[in-house]
Amino acid sequence: MEKRGKFSGSLGFILAAAGSAVGLGNIWRFPYLAAKYGGGIFLLIYVILVVTFGYTIMISEISLGRKTGLSPIGAYQALSKKYSFIGWIAVFVAFIILSYYSVIGGWVVKYFYEFVAGHSMSVAHENFFGGFIGDPWSPLFWFVIFMALTYLVVVNGVEKGIEKVSKILMPILVVLSIAIAIYSATLPGAMEGIKYLFIPNFAQFSPMTLLAALGQMFYSMSLAMGIMITYGSYLQKKDDLNKCVKRIELFDTGIAILAALMIIPAIFSFSAGDSAVLNANLNKGPGLMFVTLPKVFDSMPFGGVVGGAFFLLVFFAALTSAISLMESVVSTLVDKWKLRRGPATAIVAGGAFILGIPSSLGNGIWSSFTILGMDFLTFFDFITNAVLMPIGALLTCLFVGYVIGVKTISDEVKISSQFKREAMYKIMIKYVAPICIVAILISSVLEAFGVLKF
Ligand code: PHE
């Protein structure tokens, strides 16, 4: 048995957990959802969900990990044998996310390459993105590159290199994002975009806003996937759990808001007051980051360099998240099937690659195949975020609330810190969260099947 590593202190843990949390979810996914679902109202609901639901589930997972010192399946099993299936669901979801996450990771690498090659002008063209993802082979090629890089890091063991690299790159990402956001704010007409993002318009609320915000919250905080259990298992008893969770929340939400600040004001500016164009741009969906930001870079001095630097940093943010996804599946195979790390990593990377092929080609040569009206990538994204992650989170709540009992978690938290939100936590985990999740799940599935229309 290898000795289980420990983080040297809570800073190492916070950075690793934040490295998993901060990724494409913040920079690519959050801005397009906020743009689509009404800006301010989406942001408001999102933040409320982070500090209530998100807090509850994150502190539960981290405590489960630290208490048992085991990764997900082992942790559930150690506390109650019958419930190891919750861990299996988490691993399964991580595997699906890894498959399409790497497709988008590949898009990011492609954009980085284009900027380095000095093609920033052509990338800024309206049709560049559509042409790229519609190409028969190009998206597949970049997808393979991203998956291979993730494979290389995971197969060599994650701890040393990547942690050091993220310690340097994450702060640079923050600084660069602030600079780009400030620049975006100076574009003509950008103020309307800032208002759209920060002033909630309650008329734009719909159950879909809530559902999208909930799915995004789980996704962005890397919850319901056992990742926080695994990281929690490396924490020391003296580390302050409450503080750790607060820092991760702040960091993760901060980067998401920054990303939205880079993109949304720019959409308003480029739409030049034409509301039809504006609406079309706000609804661009998954392509938004890849369409709007290159235009921002094109309009700024040294835009080619800034664009190259930006996509490099997004690539690292995506890589640290993809690593956490792959690592969680690999460590399960190593623990449960007694595979060696090398073959296990090859199986996971190969499997995720095969599963990712439809997502990669779904906007191009396979665009005529749709599931419930969605292309493959959108479908996998929907099924994981709107269905499977909520189910995972629901099971976690029920497990803590009714199987092992809230006291198990609060005792663990109180070993080293105050549990300031304990009263809320108890009510959340036993009643509010399960009921809300079930309600949201049912409405989302009905919506997808066209029974309900929001
Ligand atoms: N949280 C990551 C992001 O925001 C994605 C992710 C989801 C990573 C689930 C791990 C687990 O990009």
Image: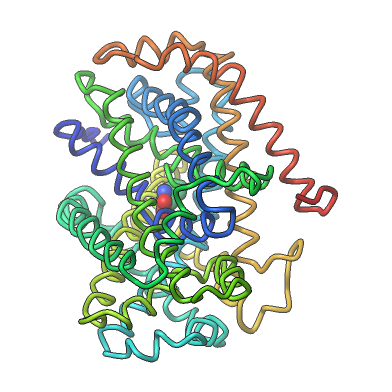
Q: Quadrant of residue 202?
A: top right
Q: Residue at x 25, y 58 (%)?
A: 178
Q: Is residue 92 visible?
A: no
**Residue 46 vertical placement versus 161 (above, below):** above
Looking at the image, what colour scheme do you see?
rainbow
Considering every residue shown, the one lying at the far right of the view is 451
Q: Is residue 100 left or right of residue 118?
A: right
Name the one closer to the observer, 349 or 106: 106
Provide residue 126's location: percent of width, then percent of height. 49, 85
In the rendered view, tell whether residue 8 sits above or below residue 122. above
Image quadrant for the N terminus? top left
Side (left or right) of 111 relative to 166: right
From the top left corner, tell me how far across and down residue 174 is, in percent.
24, 55
| Residue 263: % across, % down | 41, 65
- Pinpoint residue 285: horizontal percent, then vertical percent: 56, 66
Residue drawn at x 36%, y 78% as measured from the top left:
111
* Nearer to the camera, 176 or 237: 176
Left or right side of 240 for 55: right
State whether residue 387 is above or below residue 425.
below
- Looking at the image, is 34 positioned above or below residue 89? below
Residue 2: image quadrant is top left
**Residue drawn at x 33%, y 64% as measured from the top left:** 185
